[in-house]
């Protein structure tokens, strides 16, 4: 099978007819070429070497690759395939807390990727242009192009609902997701497989827990399912955002505001050029919709109404309307101080004396990987070059101090 050609067909059918319902999809999953493409994609992921609860890494799976893929295809075709529970692990978050991740087995990752390859071309035709998270060809900086446009002087969308959904990935309602998917995917076998993945459960420290809610972060298909779920929110917002020029003018003449919406995964922003009381009422409507339609709650700790002059943090960046060189004001996207301090702490931890036994080359490579990822994320920020120069100086001295301690050398104080 020509995988690319089939995916293109799915995308065209979905794009041409928003009411088209897809029936005959499941057979794609156990096609030899489809499964092999899924395996190649999983192998190329950075976490491909990590084993699930069966302890089987990718290297072992590949020892009998053809046989393993054929057995996987037979189990899918015979509908005997049964996803395993994910292995629960935790990674640190920037605020000191830890984010839970679910690590599927290699087999489950390949099947999830095969499933994603079927569903993504279809749903990309449905998704909002203002949804940017976990989508091909989109990034966080695309979000901030919308932010800058909305808060430009000529548009004046200065009030912002900075919204965050409480524990979104842990609270996706499985039955609601099933109902949402039914409107596009009529293939019961595909929906049953999605259901099996959602209900596979979690294994943590030898204890199994059923998963009655949520879609585990770490699963390959989870981001797509999250976007399918929250596309309902995107479409709900259109009743406020999709107004013609004349309609917008009419609302302004009546003393009411218009709206601009943008979402990245479970974080989203609603901008208004109206007044604060109107924005407060909108937050109430938003809470009611999420609760009644999607069984979700806004985070009381992270959700706030702010004026862009006061600034707000979003996706690890800081956005604030400031005076520009031309005398007016414009919204600048900057690196938050907390992000700089977090990087410094990680560098200091990596160059502490307790790590003096590590090789210098290995240490430099590890630091470069850390710095490169951080720098790429923030490189488009306002005055990023100045921040980077300061950090270069700091990191150079931390590394030099580590080398000196490693070899019992004395150096002059950097200050």
Image: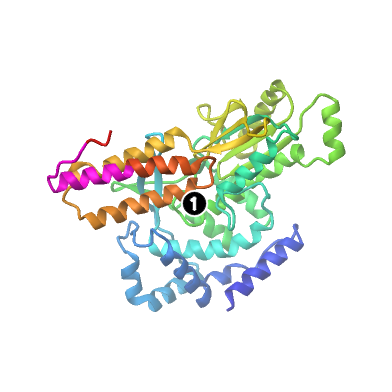
Q: Where residue 106 sits in the image (x, y, percent)?
A: 39, 63
Residue shown at the point (38%, 58%) measured from the top left: 47
Q: Is the magenta stretch mostly helix, strand or loop?
A: helix
Residue shown at the point (62%, 36%) measured from the top left: 269
Asked if residue 393 is positioned above or below residue 225 in the image, the reply reads: above
Q: Where residue 180 sits in the image (x, y, percent)?
A: 64, 49
Residue shown at the point (48%, 55%) measured from the top left: 197
Location of the C terminus (image quadrant): top left
Residue 397 or residue 257, whichever sits in front: 397
Read off the magenta span: 395-412
Q: Where residue 394 sits in the image (x, y, percent)?
A: 33, 40
Q: Where residue 273 sits in the image (x, y, percent)?
A: 73, 30
Within 10 Å of disc 1 (Cα), the crowding (few <14, some 14-19, many 20+) is: many
Asked if residue 262 is positioned above or below residue 163 in the image, the reply reads: below
Residue 145 or residue 364, whichever sits in front: 364
Q: Which residue, given by chain and number where applicable, does mark 1 sit on? A: 198
Do we see residue 396 in this rendering? yes
């Amino acid at each position: 099978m020509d995988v690319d050609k089939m995916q293109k067909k799915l995308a065209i059918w979905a794009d041409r007819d928003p009411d088209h319902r897809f029936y005959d999809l499941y057979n794609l999953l156990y096609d030899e070429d489809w499964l092999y493409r899924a395996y190649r994609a999983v192998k190329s992921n950075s976490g491909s070497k990590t084993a699930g609860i069966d302890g089987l890494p990718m290297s072992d799976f590949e020892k009998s690759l053809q046989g393993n893929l054929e057995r996987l295809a037979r189990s899918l075709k015979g509908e005997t395939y049964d996803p395993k529970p994910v292995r629960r692990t935790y990674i640190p978050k920037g605020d000191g807390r830890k984010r839970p991740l679910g690590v599927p087995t290699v087999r489950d990752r390949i099947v999830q990727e095969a499933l994603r390859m079927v569903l993504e071309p279809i749903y990309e035709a449905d998704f909002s242009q203002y949804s940017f998270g976990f989508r091909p060809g989109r990034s966080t900086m695309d979000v901030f192009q919308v932010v800058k446009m909305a808060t430009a002087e000529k548009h004046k969308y200065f009030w912002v609902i900075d919204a965050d959904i409480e524990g979104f990935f842990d609270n996706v309602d499985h039955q609601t997701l099933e109902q949402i998917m039914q409107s596009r995917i009529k293939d019961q076998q595909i929906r049953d497989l999605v259901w099996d993945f959602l209900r596979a459960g979690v294994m943590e420290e030898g204890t199994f827990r059923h998963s009655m809610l949520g879609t585990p972060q770490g699963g390959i298909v989870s981001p797509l399912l999250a976007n399918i779920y929250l596309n309902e929110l995107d479409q709900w917002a259109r009743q406020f955002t999709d107004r013609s020029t004349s309609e917008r003018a009419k609302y302004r003449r009546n003393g009411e505001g218009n709206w601009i919406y943008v979402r990245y995964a479970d974080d989203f922003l609603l901008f208004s050029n109206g007044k604060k009381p109107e924005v407060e009422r909108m937050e109430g409507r938003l809470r009611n919709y999420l609760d009644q339609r999607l069984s979700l709650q806004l985070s009381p700790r992270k959700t706030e109404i702010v004026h862009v002059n006061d600034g707000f943090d979003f996706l690890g960046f800081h956005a604030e309307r400031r005076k520009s060189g031309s005398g007016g004001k414009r919204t600048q996207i900057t690196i938050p101080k907390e992000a700089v301090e977090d990087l410094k702490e990680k560098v200091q931890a990596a160059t502490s004396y307790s790590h003096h036994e590590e090789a210098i080359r290995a240490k430099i490579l590890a630091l470069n990987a850390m710095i490169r990822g951080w720098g790429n994320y923030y490189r488009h920020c306002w005055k990023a070059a100045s921040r980077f120069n300061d950090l270069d100086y700091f990191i150079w001295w931390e590394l030099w101090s580590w080398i000196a301690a490693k070899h019992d050398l004395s150096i002059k104080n950097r200050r």
